[in-house]
Amino acid sequence: MSRKHPPSTAPVDRLTSMGRGRARTTEQNVEPLPESRAFTDRWWLAAPGHDESLRSLVERADRLYGKPPPEGYAWQSRPYGEGAQHLDAPTSRELARLARMLGTSPRHLRTHCLEDGPHLLEVSERRAYCPQCLQEDSAAGRPRTFRRAWARVLIVSCSEHGTPLQWAEPRLAAEVNFALGPSQPELAEEDWEVLRLIDTFAHTLEACLWGNASWPAEWRGNPHAARALLIRCLSNLSSRRAAPPVAQLWVRSSLIPVISVPLRNVPPLHGVPWKVVQRVGRPAWRRAALWLVAAQVIPELPEWCRPETIPTAYFAETDEWWGNFCPSPHTQKLRQVYSSLRRLCAPFPIDQAQSPP
């Protein structure tokens, strides 16, 4: 019978005594350690790698020791259900405990934290990876790890290699050697130009929204209008389940490995509108929406660089629905969000033919 993670301790600073003697092991073990080799307050893991997130480090511990008990990890002060949402940003007390378990300093671990913010994906969606980075990890004998840079909403390619980010299914979290695709997909030069366009637009939008960059003078609208259009592309703004507008995008076969759309109905938008974008972890889905927005923002793009065969008015169905819908107290807030987003998108060709309601 295998030993799981030790139960969570009470919120005190001093940890329990050392466990059952010294064990020689590596992270290459896929099965949880047997009870005779488990430890109560020490994780025998390699130190956090280059730009590795703490959530990635915890996944490595899960591969070695198995999933934690319901009360959470030994270093956590919060229950597991709540603490799982804060694995990338533990409290100072939790960070000190984790540092002791790893044999490192809290200051070192602090550099691997990710404080929540609008520029980051939701915690459960931070599973994008660069296959070339992971292949280099494997070749160097290092654990394969998720980088913090890959958790940003508007990052869809690796800054070191220019490789399009891919998506690791959550079910693969317990496998050390999950399948890796080729470092560079086989794409034509025109396809690479499309990816470079998307990357340039995404980096510029990020720098203008959360940095000090200026919006290019030749581009339409402004960063907030572009963000509103991105929300509209990925949201269901009607009051019934429906596919988001981005699902209407047609992608040529050569681009399907890196650009795809969610072919499913989603519930109506609720809560903070930007959260809809933060919940889209798959880089291929984010590229599709960014491509649609870039085509509206950047004037005079070459025809081959624009999305193909997409209806000109791909928001028309939602606009028509609201035009024929009788006002209701239950949909008042959603209608306000819809109207506000449409007004912000006024500078773009997609909405210039119609005036906001």
Image (cartoon, rainbow, N blue to C red):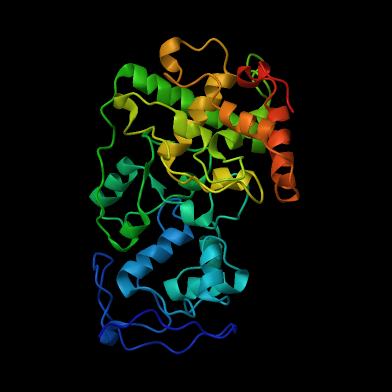
Up/down of 31 relative to 212, above or below: below
On the rendered image, what quadrant is the N terminus found in?
A: bottom left
Residue at the spot 41% in from the left edge and 76% down from the top edge: 68
Residue at the spot 39% in from the left edge and 39% down from the top edge: 165
Residue at the spot 40% in from the left edge and 84% down from the top edge: 40
In the rendered image, residue 329, in percent from the top left (x then y), is placed at: 76, 49
Q: Is residue 220 left or right of residue 279?
A: right
Residue at the spot 56% in from the left edge and 22% down from the top edge: 313
How many marks can you see?
0
Q: Quadrant of residue 19?
A: bottom left
Q: Is residue 350 left or right of residue 103?
A: right
Residue 350 in view here:
yes
In the rendered image, residue 173, in percent from the top left (x then y), is placed at: 34, 60
In the rendered image, residue 280, in percent from the top left (x then y), is placed at: 49, 45
Residue 45 in view here:
no
Up/down of 31 relative to 157, above or below: below
Foreground of the two, 14 or 104: 14
In the rendered image, residue 153, in percent from the top left (x then y), is placed at: 53, 42
On the rendered image, what quadrant is the C terminus found in?
A: top right
Up/down of 89 relative to 122, above or below: below
